[in-house]
Every structure is written in C-alpha cells, then in structure tokens.
Amino acid sequence: MAWYRTGTVGVTNGSPAVTLTGGNALTNIFPGDTFWGPDGEPYEIAAISSETTFTLATDYQGPTATGQPYAIQPTGSTGALRLLYEQVSTLVTHYQTGRDAWAAAAAGTLKGRKSAGAGDVEDLSPADVLALLTAGPAAATLTGAEVLPALQEGNGVNVTALRLVNEVLAALGVYVDASGRLGIGTSTFDGAGDRRLQVGGSNTASQLLAKSNTTHLALYASSGTDAYISVPTGSAMHLGHGPADGSAFSDGIVLDANGNLLVGVPSGSTHYIDKSGAAVGTRFLVLGGRVGFDKVDGSNWSASATAMVIGNNTTTSRSINAAGTINTNGADYAEYVLKAWYCSALNPGAICGINADGLLTDRFDDAHTFVIKSTNPAVVGNDTWAQAVGPRPERPALDLPAYTGPERPVDGDPDYAAKMAAWEAAQADHAAAIEAARAAHATAMQQYEADLADFEARLEAERVKWDRIAFSGQVPVNVTGALPGQYIDAAPGPDGGIIGVPVEAPGPRTVGKVWKILPDGRAWVAVIIG
C-alpha cells in the first residue's frame, strides 16, 4: 500500500492528539498504521477520531508545531481491510449514482442532449440513462443545474467528453474530456497532456493551467510565454516565474519543509530575505517606508549568543545609519580588555588596574591606571575576543526529497497494470529516499550537537580571559562609607590587591565621583579615568 501524505498536521509536545488539515483520516488512516511525525520519529496510531483528528498510542515527543509535513505508513494488518473498504465504497457509490439517475429520469426531471452539440434539449428516459451508464453515445451535453448525477468521476460512465453549456448565452461553461482534463470556458487544452485544468482559452490574460502531477500552477500572461508559478513539490512551496511550459522557472519565494521562508535565495537553514544580484550598498528591503536594509559585504561579528547580528559595508565600515537616538537600558560605555594571566575573576563594580602591557590586573603594584568593571553597559566596544573561537556551528536543515515519479493511474487505463507497478515502485523509491534523508539528517544533527557543545566550551574558555571595563557614564562601585560629592580613589588592599576609598579631591588614582549612595550602601559614581 502507498504511504499517505496528503495535507499537513499539527502536533503538541507531550500529547497523543494529532490534527490533520487538508486530508481525510477516516478513509486513509487506520489504527495500527505508523505515523512519521515532523520530528522524524515513528509513532503507532491508536485511534481515528474524525476526518481531521487521530490519536497516537504514545505522547508526541517532538516540539509543538502546526502546518507540518508528515507520512502515514500502512501496516500489513490493515492493508487488506483498507483495500476491501475502498472496493466496497466504490461499489456503493456506483449503485447510488445509477439509482439516483434512474429515479430522476423516471420522474421526468432529467434533461439533456443525447448527442454532443446536436439536437434539442429534451427529457432523458431511463433507457437513455442506461445507455449512458453502459456504452452511451460518443458524448453527452447537459444544461445548467440539470447535471446527470451518473456523470461523476469514477462511476463507470463510458463517455468521451462531458459539456455543461449555458443555454441562454450558448456558451461553453465546463468541459471534461476523456482523459479527465477539466476546462472552464474552453474545450481546447494548451501544452502537453499533463495539463489537468485550464480556465480560459489559449494564451489569454486570465488563463489558468494546472499540471496533473501538481508540480505547477501557472497564471499566464496574454502572450503565453511568461507565468507566475506556484510549485508544491512535496517538501517545499515555490512561487516564481518562468516559461509557459513550467520549466526552468526562477524562484521568487520558497517555503521549505522546515518552515523557512526564503525570498531571493533557493535554499537556507533559516528565514532568509535577499535580492539576487543586488550590489553592495543597494537597498533591497524597506519596512514601513522608513526602515531600509542595504546589501553589505562584511560579517565579522562576534560568535557570542545574541538577539541580532549586523554586518557592515567594508568600504565605509558602517553598520547602522540612524536619524534619531539609539536608546538602551545600560548606563555606561564599556570596552572589553584582556586580563593578565594571573588576574583572578572580577566582580561587577570592582576596582582593578591596567599594567604596563595594557592588561587588566588585580595587583595594586602592577597598575599604572585604575578602572572600574562595568555592571550594566549601554554600549560595549572592542568585542573581538570571540573571533579566536571561529564561527558558531550551523544547525542542519531537514531537506526531504520531492516526489518526481509518475502519477497513480486511473481505473480503466489500458496500461493500468504496468503503470500501477511503475507507480508503486516510484512510491517505494520515494519512501526510501525520504527515510535516507531523515537518517542523514539525524546523523548530521548528532554531529551538530557535538560541534555546538565543543564550540560553547571553547567560547566560554575564551570569554573568561576578558572583562568589560567602564570608560564613561555611571556605574556602581564596590565601596561603602562614601558620601555624595566625594571621590573614589584606588588604594592598596589586603594581600597586594586593590580596594577603593572615599576622598575629598580627585587625584591620579581617582576612578569616579560619587553621585549617590545605593540602597545596599555602595557608591554610584560618574566614571573618571585618572
């Protein structure tokens, strides 16, 4: 049996409930089947609740998500029951269709032409219905809402084409040909035989075409040579443009299987917006008419964890041009300064020194200048220490291969057996390719997690070699007993360390002027570097 993948699912971490959108769980999913969730793990299906909900035998272990791809793997125990259900359902549908058509004809309420495009609209008798249900004429044309119920897909009606005609305007409304292609407002199909839907005549401005393998949905210009195309390929949705045959199109927007929105790029492991071919300095995105994003070529930012990284224009060295202020919660300007190898850990607000090598020291006799460690900086400079660690590892994306094999053949196809065998083989190959992709992704994730742990360890080892020192602004200093208006000077402490003492006048060892006393008794100072 083929795997079922129609629609998307919503799952919740720690819950067995699964919500199905765009599919039918009652007719396609059975207890005992295997649910391959968005996390790439298999779960046994315990029960089917409705067309849109089913329940797993165990709680879902992956992250909560909606609109995710999935797969249902039928089990051997349900395959025979599923086939029996499909056959009985088809039989009942055929019986009901024929019964309803016969009843309508017997009541004299069914009208139509007995020959395509010829003769007047007249009552259809039960004998006419029987002819349509068996051999029938070459074509049948029906009017308005008086559509023969028997002429429905899959009921065994043997007609070459079905036409629904507006009798007042004498215009063709809907046309279905013998291969199942649907035309609205036209009976002529452009392009190859895989076009399954066409709205409007050849190369019209409003023409809409869909391919039977669901890989293209194109809205054509009047010339028929350019189209905007939506391409669901099983693992991603593409919006782009290209030639009328749907080949060699260029992606404009991609929504991939990982939920990443990609604009201007064909692939990526995160949401990504760019403009292909844009030169450095070119504005490629504007938000709200006043926030612009320009193409830059520099990306030498720190690898430390943060909320945002911004590259720079390497010609001007600029990252941000702001027409107004840049506001933060911090209170001082600080810079990273490398510590001497013997310097111990420094607490925020500690007084420390700068030695002859320009390194931070906690030894009074080694220092020629004294500074305060920042507590809550607004801006931090000299943030280059993480460059020695290298770039942060990039999380691998799960890229599931798209199905590109043949379609499932329809009943009555003269080559049904051969096409069915080819379709089942292609489905099996596709399922194997998906499993291979999931296995490769799992291996890549293991390597990524190991690389990330190693990176974080090396990053922390490098970080402790540096400290943020206040160069201007307001900071707390770890000195008590001071009064507003006094100054704080560095002084020798126990064991050759550095402490702070309040003084009445500034000097070469002054680190700040006291503005106020904090509730914990420490001094709040305006930074001074003597």
Image: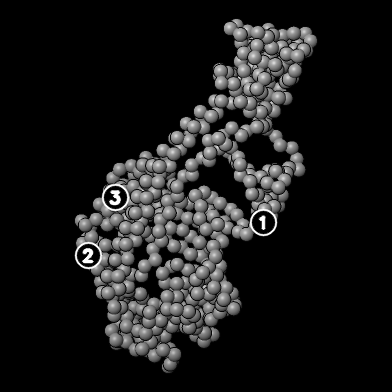
Mark 3 or 1, nearer chain start:
3
Residue type (three-letter) at the residue carrying disc 2: Leu
Residue type (three-letter) at the residue carrying disc 1: Ala
Give the left or right position of residue 83, taking residue 54 as reference.
left
Q: Mark 1 highlights which residue?
A: 279
Marks 2/3: CA distance? 20 Å
Q: Which quadrant is home to the C terminus? A: top right
The mark lying in front, picked from 1 and 2, is 1
Q: Which mark is residue 62?
A: none
Camera-side residue of 216 and 10: 216
Residue shown at 36% from the left, 89% from the top = 138
Q: Mark 3 highlights which residue?
A: 45
Mark 2 or 3, nearer chain start:
3
Residue shown at 62% from the left, 57% from the top = 275
Q: Which quadrant is home to the N terminus? A: bottom left
Give the left or right position of residue 254, taking residue 479 as reference.
left
Marks 1/2: CA distance? 62 Å
Residue shown at 45% from the left, 72% from the top = 211
Residue 428 appears at what percent x and percent y?
Answer: 30, 62
